[in-house]
Image (tube, helix red, strand yellow):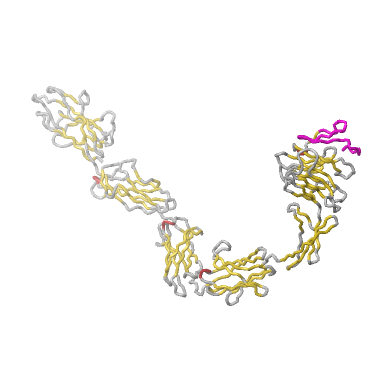
Amino acid sequence: MNENGEKDVVMFSYYNGIRAYYLNGTEYWSAINPGDDPYQYEIEVFDEDEDGLLDDFVVGADPYGSGDSYIRAYNNDKTELWSYTLEEQDEAIYSLSVWDIDSDGKDEIVAGSSLGWVYVLNISGELEFKLNLSHGSIGKEFGESPGLVSGDFNRDGVLDIGVASEEGYLNTIQEVGCIARFSDSGEYDMEWNVSLNKWEINKTFGSTGVYEYNVSCSKGGYEGEFLSSGIDVIVIPNITNVTDFNENLVLDGDVVVGENVTINVTLEGNYGIDKVWVKVWEGAVGVSTVIYEGFLSLIGSFWTVTFGTDPTFGFGDVNYTVYANNTLGDEINESGNFTVVSSNVAPDNPVVSLNSSDGSNKTLSDLNCLAMVSDDDGDNLDVWVGWYKGGVLNMTVMEGGVSNGTDYVGVLGSGNTTKGEYWNCSVMVSDGSLNSSWVNSSNLTILNSLPVVTLISPTNWNATTNRSLELVWSGFDADGDSLVYEYDIVEGYFAGDGTSCDDARDADDASANYSPSVDWKCLYDNGYYYNWTVRANDSEGWGDWASVWHFNVTAEIGIVLISDEINFGNMNPGDANDTDGSSLDAFELDNDGNVDLNVSINSSALWSAEPGTSVYYQVKANNVSGEEGAFDWLKSLVSWFNMPIMGQVVVIENLSYEDGDDGAEIDIRLDVPVSEDPGVKQSTIVFTGALGE
């Protein structure tokens, strides 16, 4: 080991390491652990670099349940030279020897494993052969390698390998060489396939036919018996040409349904071809139903078959696939197609146009696809209509049994269309066997539909006393657009000499009602009514005005006396008193109607001495505290004047009807005539309200 030519170094293995010592016990080198494998059962020295010194060593490394197993080689300074992976995991080398097995002057490494394998490696770690004897372990874990030995056991002058196995078997292994000779004068050295445990050779043949061969094996200069046999060399199928003919032998000609088709196939070679056959498909190759299948016959140098067609073949391109295989099962295929036509004449291509049912081209109009359909054979026809929205097929409908020569109309309901879309239709006509072409109409754009307004309330010619009456309507847009509204309200004059009234109202951004912020001014009592109408806008235009409706507002006159009695108490002739400058309460009245009022007054006689209108009995109008401005102060009688006894006098003008600002007071002044007789004096005052607008 130390390259001094002496056997003076001892090596031994143990768990997780190998150590080397001189014979005097001095350590040669410290422990190594090959590949971190815990067990190394066998060690042998050998001359890996062929320098004449046994200064290299080989060891079997066992992971002991943790992975691959190896044979590893090292030089004398512990450097790994090579590593060979064993056949199976967790496999241990129990026997290890170094011999020149094949007498070539170079040693081989012979190893026996715990799983019955024999490995023979050259000194570079390359496998020469391996063999599993399948008789259990070769050797034991530690000690001398009793499982392997070399010798000329059969005395043929060639070294053999003796193997003792755990299950009680003794085998001898000897190196053998084999030669294969063929009838085409080829001679080849065979190689041992260590995976198959067989001799083999790979040879390429230049042509088809039967080749005779023999195999002989030899060892140590002795040749064994011949093994003779033959090989039938055939071609792998290769389709070079496929053609089809109609019944009139026209290449690629149309096939009239009911007539025959002939398919011819040429192969690169026909020797060893087992069969050639064809499949005709209902649709796509390989995935649809087979509608015909048959074998081709070899005629001369090509294969051929003729078969008939029927309606199951359909019309148009019909796909077929030709297959060929040899006697070994190699297969190839190639696909083609032929065209089946009918003896029938296809219907004429229709003339197609598109319009809307009412000519408006709007959302609420149906679309009519017009087509003149005709067939020279006079057949009843199936009419197919494809409806396209924006150039994309939206739906397809079919109507069968349409008479020849019909002006056909296909209808697309208005519920399918919306403004801004463009549509066209496409029509194809079929007689059940043949079809016309699809023919397209021109495009038609769906136009905007202007909105429609419906008046809801008040109903037409409604009469009301509600001076803040709300107007309500609804709008409909066929395209579903958002709407804004314009209303137009104007008074109308129908009779009488009423006061002039101007109350026109309009707006063009309204919602679907109108609640007046200012009361309706023009009254029916003055000869007026209101006309009103509404229209809507969908951002593209205004729709028509709704039919004009009418309503009128009628005056409702009502007066409520809050205080209806004044008691002046005891008075003497010549005494005077009034409600404005004393603690006496005046009369108080409220306008309880819906219009401004003019309030008139008159009274029965109070004094017997002065029974008529006089300064002894006076009246005037006044404000209710907190409701100042409830009537027209300048036009009303706000200074004392004589109470009318026989006729009426307007004392208050334009008393408001607005709640909280609709009250007034009536003050009374009495002056007792000096000639008035004593007694209880009383009179009745009548307040009369009249329209003040």
In percent of width and height, residue 545 lies at 36, 53
Front-lying residue, 232 or 197: 197
In percent of width and height, residue 609 lies at 9, 28
Magenta highlight range: 1-30
Residue 646 visible, this angle: yes
- 443 with respect to 322 (left or right): left
Q: Split into 4 quadrants, where in the image is the C terminus?
A: top left
Q: Split into 4 quadrants, where in the image is the N terminus?
A: top right
- 685 with respect to 549 (left or right): left
Residue 317 visible, this angle: no
25 drawn magenta: yes
- 373 with respect to 299 (left or right): left
- 653 with respect to 445 (left or right): left
Q: Residue at x 83, y 44 (%)?
A: 98
Q: Residue at x 69, y 65 (%)?
A: 236
Front-lying residue, 203 or 632: 203
Q: Residue at x 78, y 56 (%)?
A: 191
Residue 408 is drawn in which quadrant? bottom left
In percent of width and height, residue 663 lies at 25, 32
Q: Is residue 29 above or below residue 537?
A: above
372 drawn magenta: no
Q: How many numbered discs, if any? A: 0
In percent of width and height, residue 79 lies at 82, 39
Front-lying residue, 413 or 74: 74
